[in-house]
Structure formats: C-alpha cells, structure tokens
C-alpha cells in the first residue's frame, strides 16, 4: 500500500547546525538513489548554507521578461501526465512507487492576473569553477510560506551528473561532480523547454518554515564530492504581500494560487500521521485532486511538514484560481469558502 509518509519532508523547528543539516541532505539523497522515489524521504533535506557569497553581477534576463514562458515551466505541461509507476526489482523489492499525476496546459489569463504581478527579478550570479549559477527570478507567498525560484546552471563544457525522474523532478546524486541547492526545504524540477547540454534551467518549489529568517533565501552551487564547498547567491524575499490567498475553517487552512497550508491540530488531525486526501473544489463543479492515497494520485510538486507547528504545506503543479474556489475537502471533511476574493 502506498505510504505517503515516505514522500513527505518532515522537520522540527529545532534547528541543528548547518554542517549537520548538510550531512542530513547528503544522506537523504544517498538513501534515495536506489529507491528512485519522486517525493520527499522522511528526513529533512535542508541545508543552512552559511558560506561566503560569490561575486555577484547583474545579468540579462531570459525568461523573466516574458513571465508566461517562465510560468509555463512551473505550471504548464512541462512533463506528460502519468497513471503512476510501481516497479519491483528481481528480488521482489519495491524500487519505484510514484503515484499518478496530471499536468495541464497553463491558463495564461489566470497566470497573468493572479501570479505574474508578484514575480520579482533577481539577476545575480555565483561562480564555482567552470560552473555559473544565475538566479533569474522568484515568487514568494508569505501567507503560505512557500514560493518559486527560477535559476540556471551553466558550464561551457557541459552540465552533467544530475538525474531526472519521470515527473520532471531533478536531483544531484552523491557522486555528481557538482550540485545546486537552496537553504530552504525544496524540490527542483527540470525546465525541459529551455535546458540544453551546457545550460540547465531549474524550477524550484520551496518552503521557508525551516529558515530562521524567512527573508534570507540562499541558492548555492558547489563541489558534489564536498558539499561544504560552495558559492552562494542571497535572495531577498518579500515579507508581506503576495498572490490572492483565501482562508477556510477559521484560518486553519490558507490557500493561495501556488500552495496550501494546513494547521492540522486546528482541524483535529494528528501531526504524526500524513494527510491522505486533499481535494480542491471549484464553483463550476470541477476538482483539483492534490492528494488521494486511495486513488494513488499526487499532484503536488512539494510536500512539507513542520511537526512543531503542526503545519502541512503543499505546493501545486498548476495555478489555482482562488477566485473560483468553492471548498476544500481534507480527509473526508469539506470546508467551504464563504467569501471568495474578488478579481
């Protein structure tokens, strides 16, 4: 039976040292490699990168100047939909257990209205050896504590060593010559439309609950064999404002166009047991199944559990029109949206 606990990032707000967390991150991916899981192993794959920042320089924007192109990479049909993948090795051991996912074409009108105005330019670089990391743009929603980051890794001799799963998720194995990561809990997905042999474009969905200073997001590139050796770009996140979010269940549920935050204790849900069903219902009668364990479906791009705060945070694989929502079902209970936000 599909156990989503093995796919959920779970951390406490009790912060370990940056070095310990880097070791946890490395161990997580070493464990993850033979199993080829596309969701989060139940360890904190987070890093507190307290490194000297590399030289920063302004660069010309490629995708930020056309936000529709950029948002296509995050929320369009960047990868094909799939009915799910379950595989066993010759010894009968489960090696792949990926629930079904559905990717839809980007609704450009909703994207332009609800999300594009909140994208912000970064345009800074970090250089490590022959590699250049350029952070182009981002988006952050303080209401949910989640955001998007768009950046590229370049090497004139070619970028290699990464792995990509069928749902588009990308990660750097322990034996990769280089790695890139943030100091937030996050997941990287490949922008297949823009990536070439020498330029790797990445779409990162991140959650800031673990970062002590939520405005201090760091993106690093470094030696794949020594993950304490890296160069870093600092990204300032807005402390307020963001896409139009709505609250349900007296504030226990916060939902924005890019993600959802659920305070489990307020809904009478345990924190030590994962949420198996989250379905968003629109006023026109259509549904967005974010999670459904029984149906073996998962349409979230990143799942995070802050155990100390009792908060479940999921980021979406499509833009949710919060002005058209009717209710949200969580574990069989329906929570209506009483006053949808105006467009």
Image (cartoon, helix red, strand yellow):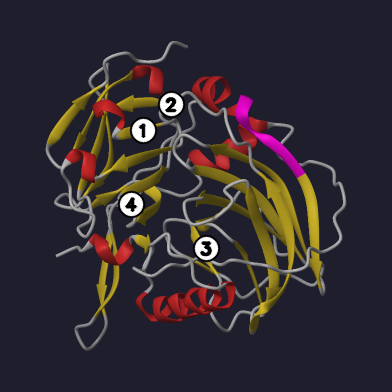
Q: Report helix, strand or loop for mark 2.
A: loop
Residue 254's label in the rendered image is 1
| Disc 2/disc 3 C-alpha distance (Å) | 29 Å
Q: Which mark is residue 170?
A: 3
First in residue order: circle 1 vs circle 3? 3
From the image, state whether disc 4 or disc 1 is nearer to you.
Answer: 1
Left or right of 142, for residue 5: left
The mark nearer the N terminus, 2 or 4, is 4
Local SS, label 3: strand
Measure the alpha-carbon separation of dots 2 and 4.
Answer: 29 Å
Q: Earlier in the sequence, mark 2 or mark 3?
A: 3
**Is 120 part of what is drawn in magenta?**
yes
**Mark 4 nearby-residue class (10 Å; few <14, some 14–19, many ≥20):** some
Check if mark 1's residue and mark 2's residue have beta carbons within 8 Å: yes
- View extreme (top): residue: 342
Name the mark nearer the viewer: 2 or 4: 2
Left of 35 or right of it: where is 267? left
Residue pointed to by mark 4: 82
Residue mark closest to the camera, 4 vs 3: 3
- Say which mark, if any, is on residue 330: none
Q: Residue furthest bottom?
A: 91
Residue at image position (61%, 75%) is 161
Q: CA distance from mark 4 to mark 3?
A: 17 Å
Depth order, front residue of 183/105: 183
Residue occupied by mark 2: 245
- Range shown magenta: 117-122
Quadrant for residue 268, please give it: top left
- Quarter in which the N terminus is drawn: bottom left
Q: Give how far across and how far down residue 157 sits, in percent.
A: 80, 72
For the residues marked 1 and 2, what is the alpha-carbon distance in whole angstroms? 7 Å
Q: Earlier in the sequence, mark 4 or mark 1?
A: 4
Q: Nearer the viewer, residue 320 or 8?
A: 8
């Amino acid at each position: 039976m599909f156990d989503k606990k093995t796919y959920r990032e779970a951390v406490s707000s009790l912060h370990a040292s940056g070095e310990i967390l880097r070791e946890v991150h490395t161990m997580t991916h070493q464990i993850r490699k033979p199993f080829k899981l596309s969701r989060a192993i139940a360890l904190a794959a987070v890093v507190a990168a307290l490194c000297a920042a590399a030289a920063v320089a302004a660069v010309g924007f490629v995708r930020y100047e056309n936000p529709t192109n950029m948002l296509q990479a995050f929320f369009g049909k960047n990868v094909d939909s799939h009915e799910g993948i379950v595989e066993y090795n010759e010894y009968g051991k489960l090696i792949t257990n990926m629930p079904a996912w559905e990717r839809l074409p980007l609704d450009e009108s909703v994207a332009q209205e609800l999300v594009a105005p909140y994208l912000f330019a970064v345009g800074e670089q970090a250089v490590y050896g022959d590699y250049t990391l350029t952070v182009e743009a981002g988006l952050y929603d303080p209401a949910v504590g989640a955001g998007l980051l768009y950046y590229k890794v370049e090497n004139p001799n070619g970028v290699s060593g990464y792995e990509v799963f069928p749902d588009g998720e990308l990660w750097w194995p322990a034996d990769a010559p280089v790695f890139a990561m943030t100091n937030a809990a996050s997941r990287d997905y490949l922008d297949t439309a823009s990536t070439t042999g020498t330029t790797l474009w990445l779409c990162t969905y991140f959650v800031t609950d673990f970062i002590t200073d939520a405005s201090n997001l760091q993106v690093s590139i470094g030696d794949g064999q020594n993950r304490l050796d890296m160069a870093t770009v600092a990204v300032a996140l807005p402390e307020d404002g963001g896409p139009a979010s709505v609250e349900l269940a007296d504030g226990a549920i916060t939902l924005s166009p890019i993600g959802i935050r659920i305070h489990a204790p307020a809904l009478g849900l345990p924190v030590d047991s994962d949420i198996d069903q989250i379905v968003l219902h629109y006023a026109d009668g259509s549904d967005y199944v974010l999670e459904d364990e029984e149906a073996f479906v998962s349409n979230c791009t990143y799942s995070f559990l802050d155990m100390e705060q009792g908060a479940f945070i999921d980021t979406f694989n499509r833009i949710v029109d919060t002005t058209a929502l009717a209710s949200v079902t969580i574990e069989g209970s329906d929570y209506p949206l009483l006053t949808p936000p105006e467009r």
